[in-house]
Amino acid sequence: MTENLLARETSPYLLQHKDNPVHWRPWGADALAEARAADKPILLSIGYAACHWCHVMAHESFENPDIAGLMNRHFVNIKVDREERPDLDNIYQHALAMMGEHGGWPLTMFLTPDLEPFWGGTYFPPAPRYGRPGFPQVLQSLAATYAGEPEKIADNARRMRDALATLEAPAAGGAITPAALDDVSARMLRHVDPVHGGTHGAPKFPQVNFFQALWRAYLRTRGAMYREAVTATLANICQGGIYDHLGGGFARYAVDAEWLVPHFEKMLYDNALLVELMTEVRPQLDPGPMADLLRQRTAETVAWMLADMRSADDPAAPFAFTSAYDADSEGDEGKYYVWTAAEIDALLGADADTFKAAYDVTPGGNWEGRNILNRSGDAAFGDPDREALLARCRERLLSHRARRVPPLRDDKVLADWNGLAVAALAKAAAVFDRPDWLDTAERVFAFILDNLAAASGRLHHTWCAGRAAHPGVLDDYANLARAALALHQGTGAAAYLRQAETLTAVLDRHFRDAAGGGYFMAADDTPHLLTRSKPVHDNAVPCGNGTMVEVLARLHHLTGDAAYRDRADALIAALAPQESAHLALQPTFLTGFEILENAVQVTVAGTGDGAAALVTAALASGHPRLVLTRTADGADLPPGHPAAGKGPADGRPAAYLCVGNTCSLPVTDPAALAQALKDQR
């Protein structure tokens, strides 16, 4: 079949390529059968809609008729959206790493018809430059080798198949202990940039999982260096150019070491994770500029999510969050977001000088002759009158910016990223006293179950253009189970606890490795996979296996079912590294282990307004190890619960704060409970 078939797809990324002269196919049985029937190698191109270098390679090579002709003549060309198929991306990114190459997108892999990789890279220019061969030369060379030296291709493919088989059984066999927690936290601290926050060097990614683990080390040890590492990082991120000071929301990363110049794409997952981290940190801070900054950035980021990322324009319509915004507009990265001093002067008039001083705006610009708005050097942050003036200025600039050509929005809904957003909103709702955020979290969770779950209880990974597609992966079930537990904690509704148990049961049936332990990324019935990888390390998002340690731990504490505890222990035993230093790559495992071993269980016994006030105080603490249970009289608590049988005190609703099997005396004053939780290590 000699045509481009991507017009049939819903992925915004795939649709970007539907008019290429390349005869693209989506991944699936038809394309793979075509490769086998023609005995042609597969050219697999993986990217995503917000990827700048994906656009560059598309314009330079995939829109070039001569290069497309080479691709069509010698290869079966398959285009994959990495956000739709993270299971495929995970396999072939590992393959590229095993070839000694740095990963990234666009990922360009060459496979046998049996899906075995034999060569690959990322971006290739249309002619030799940047120390890389030109894409036409790569195509011609590989086509000649495939036709003339099949034994060489077969040998490379065999070696890669054998190497990739290790993804199913990553080396592990270690343990996590309280002593190991402190040791690895101290090691992690050495990687922190003491001046600008984040980790040393450039580019700088938020690395929320990493800093979340350091924050929990602070709570555990009260070590000032941990606190400073996290608060300095958040301050620099929140005031730097990586933050969109007009529209809200954080870009994916900064290309420099000072957080000034973002890679301008915005991803749902980064913003959800940062909302959750700010929610955990804010309650521990004394009143002042830093506390105000986190409150403001959290509110602005959630407002951006609700304004720009919702899947339905009608505020009353069911919705979830879409996935990303591109970095480019009108073919120019960052054009939508940057300003000249002359534009600021013309729009703000007499207020321009105050605004320019606050936001680092100069005639020469701070980036390529233009200005990225930032407040990194603004020592006067927090003055009420000045902040009110700056807010009015931002509104005027935002209104003007809205008339520019915006970046492309990738409007597909991803189950796992929405799980991250739901959990963050459910927690932030209590800490920042925003019950409307909790309502939003419930609505989004309902949308996911209504539109991405089948009658069998199995999940789809994506929803776009009214259609659910692609098999759910480990992260979908893990993040949504964690979100359900956050909603259960925030609302007390038993239905959310049952939903978490149901999602976990599906994982156990279709993803769990009964022999080797842990969960595979893909289900046992996912077709057309060379191997089933078992993720261990955190990347931009938390590792699904690490998330499941927390899910299983919380289920154990809430239900009293020892089987959940046993599975959490087995998961850690199967996937913890032999050397504790390597745990720095698995911060989600660390945070899950702490909840398993050292949960801060608060049981509120009683009914009415008094009990509700105690619940509010517990939730507003934002304590990351909080496991909250509501009971009328203590009689319905699960077997083995440390507060079993404890009820109201002298007829008044009471809270019991338990760590391990040790519980406090009854606490009837919400302020006293709040202080106890703030002091809890």
Image (cartoon, rainbow, N blue to C red):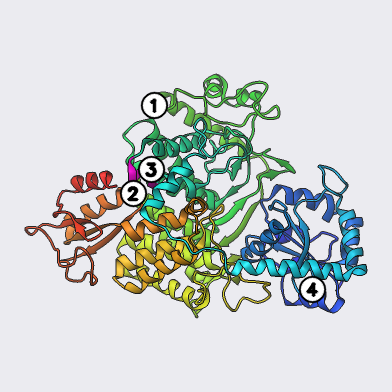
Residue at numbered disc 4: 113
- Name the residue located 57 percent from the left edge and 65 percent from the top edge: 170
Q: Image height check: is 99 above or below 241?
A: below
How far apart marks 4 and 1 lie (CA) works out to: 65 Å
Residue 201 in picture, x, y percent from top left: 60, 36
Residue drawn at x 46%, y 45% as measured from the top left: 211
Question: Do the residues under discs 3 and 4 have CB atoms within 8 angstroms?
Answer: no
- Say whether disc 1 or disc 2 marks the residue closer to the N-terminus: 1
Q: Which residue is mark 3?
A: 281
Q: Is 465 within the magenta?
A: no
Which of the two labelled residues, at mark 4 and mark 2, occupies the earlier sequence position? 4
Closest to the observer: 565 or 196?
A: 565
Q: Which mark is in front, 4 or 2? A: 4
Residue 622, disc: 2
Identify which residue, 554 or 493, lies in the foreground.
Answer: 554
Check whether the beta carbons of the residues at disc 1 and disc 3 lie within 8 A of each other. no
For label 3, the crowd category at 10 Å Cα-Cα, with few meaning under 14, some 14 to 19 and many 20 or more, is: many
Amino acid on which disc 3 is placed: Val
Question: How many residues crowd around disc 1 within 10 Å: few (fewer than 14), some, or many (20 or more)?
Answer: few
Label 1, secondary structure: give it.
helix
- 124, above or below 152, in the image: above
Residue stretch rendered in magenta on the structure: 216-222
Which quadrant would the N terminus be assigned to in this image?
bottom right
Type of amino acid under label 2 = Gly
219 inside magenta stretch: yes
Kindly tell me whether residue 152 is visible in this rendering. Answer: yes
Left/right of residue 2 with respect to residue 160 in the rendered view: right
Image location (x, y in percent) of residue 419 = 48, 60
| Upstream in sequence: badge 4 or badge 1 | 4
